[in-house]
Image (cartoon, rainbow, N blue to C red):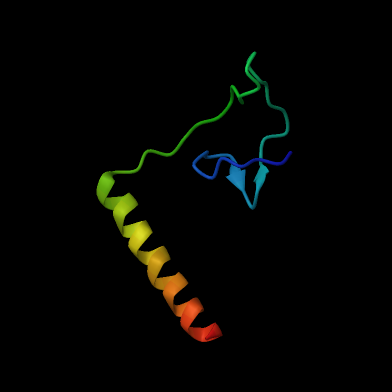
């Protein structure tokens, strides 16, 4: 099943890795287990992603 929640433990390449899931009355996955990131981890990930995007942008100029 397609999944957009990259912070869920069960997410992999835009797919849910569970074979069976349940939804609540709002259509949200009840089986979702989200990753907990510290502010520092999140900041480092943002910085890394921005560096990667800058390199890709420079490559295409």
Q: Most extreme residue toward the front, as rendered?
A: 61
Query: Residue shown at 61%/49% (left/top)?
Result: 12
The quarter in which the N terminus is drawn is: top right
Image location (x, y in percent) of residue 5: 56, 40
* Number of residue marks: 0
Which one is nearer the viewer's eye here, 58 or 43?
Answer: 58
Q: Most extreme residue toward the left, as rendered?
A: 40
Query: Residue shown at 37%/58% (left/top)?
Result: 45
Which one is nearer the viewer's eye here, 28 or 17?
Answer: 28
Image location (x, y in percent) of residue 16: 66, 40
Q: Is residue 46 above or below residue 11?
A: below
Q: Quadrant of residue 39?
A: top left
Name the side, left or right, on which 33 lies relative to 46: right
Image location (x, y in percent) of residue 40: 25, 51
Name the side, left or right, on which 59 lies relative to 16: left
Q: Most extreme residue toward the top, as rendered?
A: 25
Query: Residue shown at 33%/50% (left/top)?
Result: 42
Name the side, left or right, on which 52 lies relative to 17: left
Q: Quadrant of residue 35?
A: top left
């Amino acid at each position: 099943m397609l999944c957009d929640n990259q912070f869920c433990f069960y997410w992999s390449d835009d797919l849910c890795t569970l074979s069976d899931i349940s939804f609540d009355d709002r259509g949200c996955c009840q089986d979702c287990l989200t990753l907990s990131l510290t502010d520092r981890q999140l900041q480092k990930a943002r910085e890394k992603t921005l560096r990667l995007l800058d390199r890709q942008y420079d490559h295409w100029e």
